[in-house]
Amino acid sequence: MSSASSAVALWIMNMTGRLIGKIENLIAHSLPALGMLYGKKFYDSLVRKELDLARLKPGGSILHVGCGSLPLTALMLARHGFSVTAVDRDRRAVAAATEFVRSQRREACIHVQQADGETIDASPYDAVWVSLHVFPRRRVLRNLLENMRPEAKLVYRNPMPDGKLCCIYPLVSPGELGHGGEFHSAAADLGKQSVVIEKPYREEGLVVPITSNQDTSIDTCLEDLTALQVAIIFSVPDDPLLAPLGLRPGKRVTVSCRHPFGGPVVVHVQGRRIALGRELARKIRVEDGGVAENCLSHHIAAAEN
Amino acid sequence: MPEPSHSSSGKLILLIGPPNVGKSVIFSEMSGMDVAMANYPGTTVDYTEGEVLFGPHRALVIDVPGTYTLEASNEAEEVAIQMLDREPDLVVCVLDAANLESSIYLALQVLERRLPTLIAVNRIDLLRERGLQLDTDALSRALGTDVLRTAAVAGEGLDTLHSTICSALDGPERSTPSSKTDVSWTEAEGIHRCVITRLRQSGVTRRDLIGDASMRPWPGVLVACGVLVAVFATVVGLGMALRRFVLLPVFTGLIIPQIVSLIQEIVPSGLLQNIMIGEYGFLTKGVEWPFTLVMPYVLSFYLALCFLEDSGYLPRLGVMLDGLLGKIGLSGAGIIPLLLGYGCGIPAIMSTRALSSHKHRLTVSLMVSLSIPCMAQTGAFISLLAARSIGALSFVAAISISALAITGLLLGRILPGQSSPTLMEIPDLLLPRPVVLGKKLWVRTKHYIKDAVPAVVGGVAVAAVLYETGLMIYLGALLRPVVAGWLQLPEEAAVPILLGIFRRELTVLPLLDMNLTTLQLTVGSVVALFYVPCVAMVAVLMREFGARFALATLVITTIFAFLVGGIVARAGLLLLTI
């Protein structure tokens, strides 16, 4: 991105952030019920998906970086039985969030404090959640990954690669954070996706990826892939049309796009575009295979597969 | 049409291949004007066939509906298998160069049958575009039979195909496959790896960009709106132009006056003459209506539909609507019967067989019967209302679409059953060839003239008899409470209501000459829109779903038509007096 457009993007990010901050402040102070309604509608399923991917033992402690004035993620996590420390850099946001938590009578489970993600110590926690609007996200994420406990989980949110939020928020891949091992990701609505990394157990400076943990299955289903994610199929349900269309075990697929309103997922496989309904996509198990740069070049490259 | 068999003195050739591979282009290049659409008895599978001369041999060529495999998992595949069981004299297996691996699997299945087979690898131009190369000889050796390359859309390789078919018909033993290869995906993948090599890196083509863009939610939605507007403009605009500049002058200016003067000379004045050329003369109105009022829109509609079909855009539309249609219990594939319904309800009902859930089938069929006007009726609406008031036309269109959505939603909730998942390939976009389009249009037009015109003439003849014998006045008096009282229409509007049972446009067209106000026209249109489907369609409904469903449809549509019509009449009057 050229410097001019990145400057513009930064400015937009700033302004948007401020605007949203103001609105959330207002809601946190005067209309907490509305906030909870919003939270239940949009954040409940998101957090549920993230918890599914993270496979945390209940009762653990979670750090939420970038909670904002309306700490909805923290509240959703508390409802699942975790104790949450919600932090934000902005003092006013912290005040509003404390007020909101009090109105929801969750002071016992959620502790709000002011802290900076770039310097905070994440070692006491079983998992860390990082919101989309946290800035500068890469530095914060690197810091957290650095001082997190081994085997603790890091859950952070990204914009969807082909969505509009991509212009405002940067897309951070786990590779950029120096994490070479496996990760899980799931798409959520509203143009976001969640990425879950488990911090590897370090032995004498060697980074050992987790293969010993029997519980962690490395496969996911086609429905949970996000756009531009590449995967290798390893099992398909018993539909006679799947094989001739190229959806057979061992084939590489790239997700092209997902349609809203529960619409189909479109994938590129062997140079063809196939649209799959969500229920069918859920039944196709795949292994993560990385990320493609853009869909079209892969479409061509796949033709030679 | 009877089951396909060897033509009287000649051979039977089957064209088999996957969908979207361009078989119909190859077929239309081979065949002349003597093509017809046929239906495989007991199924909803339609296929095209035509007689072609290959050297000294006269052959019946059948364009078998596209199949991905021969595993008998759906009707099209079963039909293909049954056709292969008839031991054709030659099978031309059309493969897709751009998706060779899956096609090879199909070819292996066909070759297993040990029939004289020829392989034509089509879309070789796309292969070249992608920087790949096919070793035809290697493929020929691997499969044990002759392999040709073609790029049907560009007209490439078709002459060679023709001459190869001629020599194959001369000596069929040569084309019987020699080697025995087992049918498996590993085999297909292996063969594919050996015969395809990459020459150079290919870039992103414009076709890919547009193809992708039209499929994503954004800007796909914009494209979809643009396409729908263009379709609407074509159907209405082109239809009107055809009517005004071509069909109207020819028929009302030339042909009908000739008929009138001829009849006036031959037939003495009186009842018979009036039935022929009087008020409801089946030789005047019965000719004018189908040809000048309805046919222009039939032509323009099928032109737009065939264009959409052949360009590969329809599946994209289906994908985009799949989410929304899913909310009312349909799948994206449900868009096709709905669209077909705007042409004629009968193919629409038949095409619901492609929907795998019975609940879908019932929902879509009721939606089509109730709220989708066939092209004949739409043409009549446009003729009736557009000149008077575009507002009225839009209003009727809006009511139609709302009723569609509401019916879909309600049935989605009420009827028990599951919906089946979407799984479809989105083909590459391409510009349809005018020749192919022309042929498809010709087939549809012939079909219309053969089917519709006699039915209209018959219906009008009945009307003429009723009118001239005075029975109409009697029937009008019987229906007066409904027609004049509830619907606020003149008594003679009872006629179209009775005629509508034969052909849907007959519910609308007679209103033209009745000097009605715009409101009355609107009311008439609304009633006509929802009113019972024509007799032919009821027969199809009965065959597909049973007498109970057909009866239910008749009852629901009649009640709905009169109810809504009356409400519009009352509301309209109220609004006007305000």
Image (cartoon, helix red, strand yellow):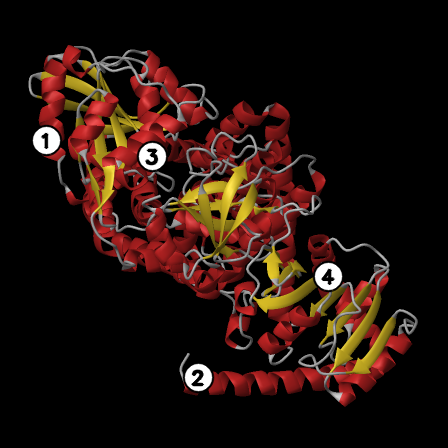
Looking at the rendering, which quadrant does residue B453 occupy?
top left
Badge 3 or badge 1: first in the primary sequence: 3
Residue B382 drawn at (x, y percent): 40, 55
Q: Nearer the viewer, residue B199 or B336?
A: B199
Q: Are marks 3 and 4 in contact (CB under 8 Å)?
A: no
Q: Nearer the viewer, residue B574 or B43?
A: B43
The residue that disc 3 covers is B101
- The mark that comes first in sequence, 4 or 2, is 2
Q: Are marks 2 and 3 in contact (CB under 8 Å)?
A: no
Q: Which residue is mark 1?
A: B160
Q: What type is the residue that disc 2 sits on? A: Ser
Q: Give the image location of residue A227, x and y in percent.
A: 50, 58
Q: Nearer the viewer, residue A205 or B204?
A: A205
| Residue to which mark 2 is pinned | A5
Name which residue type carries label 1. Thr
Mark whose residue sits in front, 3 or 1: 3
Q: How dense is the environment of label 3, judged by Cα within 10 Å: few (below 14), some, or many (20 and up)? A: many
Measured in 3D between alpha carbons, the distance from the residue under mark 3 to the one under mark 4, in whole angstroms, is 45 Å
Circle number at residue B40: none
Mark 4 surroundings: few (<14), some (14-19) or many (≥20) residues within 10 A: many
Report how far apart the C-alphas of labels 4 and 2 lie in the structure: 37 Å
Q: For mark 3, name the chain.
A: B
Residue at 40% across / 28% down in the picture? B185
